[in-house]
Amino acid sequence: MKKVKLFLLVIAVMVSLSGCGGNIDLVKNGVMDFNKTTALGKALDNWESCESRNWEEFKTDNGIQVVQFSCQHKIVQFMSKLKSLVSKENMTEAQIKANHLDIASIVQTFQFTINLDDTFQIDNVQAKIIWEDGTSSDGEPLNVSQSLERLKKAYANELEFDPDMANIMTAEATSFDFFLRKSSAE
């Protein structure tokens, strides 16, 4: 009996060490056409913009295999800078009351579909905004071209919400966008 248990333990360790992670490993070890210098998983797992990250896989109702990468972005410094740049004089009373700049987190999700020939493709990218009061808004999924642009930011290790890139024009536009998103979510 001890030999059987030892054998099963050895098999379990070998399987775990072999990286038998299925579709997640397929995507993480894959290479994108626009940048063949590093694996997709290495680019996403090391993306400086992410405060936390998560990989998961699932099957849709119609049987499509999906691997999903989620990145909770670092936003504290960006939101602080945004608030300092947005002038209260230019905001409407509704914007001031909405607390639309009190964002708790922004989670960006990349979905890759697994093809029948054991390759994969980017399917979409979307972002979920969660405000401190619990209100949340799921953004519209980006098309493939827009999704590739987001992936290129990850490969370049660029912050998605870079406080150094914020100026008065981007602050006003971003503030209005967050206001519209929060208003439609309530």
Image (cartoon, grey):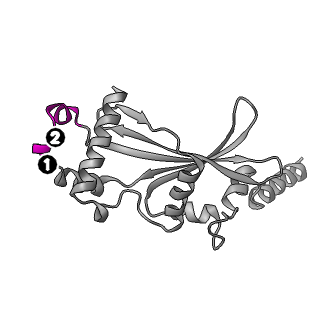
Q: Rounded to the nearest whole Å, what is the CA distance between mark 2 and mark 1? A: 7 Å
Q: Left of 5 or right of it: where is 132?
A: left
Choose top left, top right, bottom left or bottom right for residue 168: bottom left
What is the three-letter code of the residue carrying label 1? Ser
Give x and y (percent) for residue 91.
Answer: 16, 40
What is the three-letter code of the residue carrying label 2? Met
Residue at 13 percent of width and 48 percent of height: 87
Residue at 20 percent of width and 50 percent of height: 83
The C terminus, quarter of image: top left
Identity of the residue furthest to the left in this view: 89
Write the start and end of the magenta stretch as one range: 88-99
Give x and y (percent) for residue 21.
Answer: 73, 53
Q: Based on the picture, tell me whether residue 95 belongs to the magenta stretch.
A: yes
Magenta-colored segment: predominant secondary structure: helix
Task: Name the residue that disc number 1 marks.
Answer: 87
Task: Name the residue that disc number 2 marks.
Answer: 91
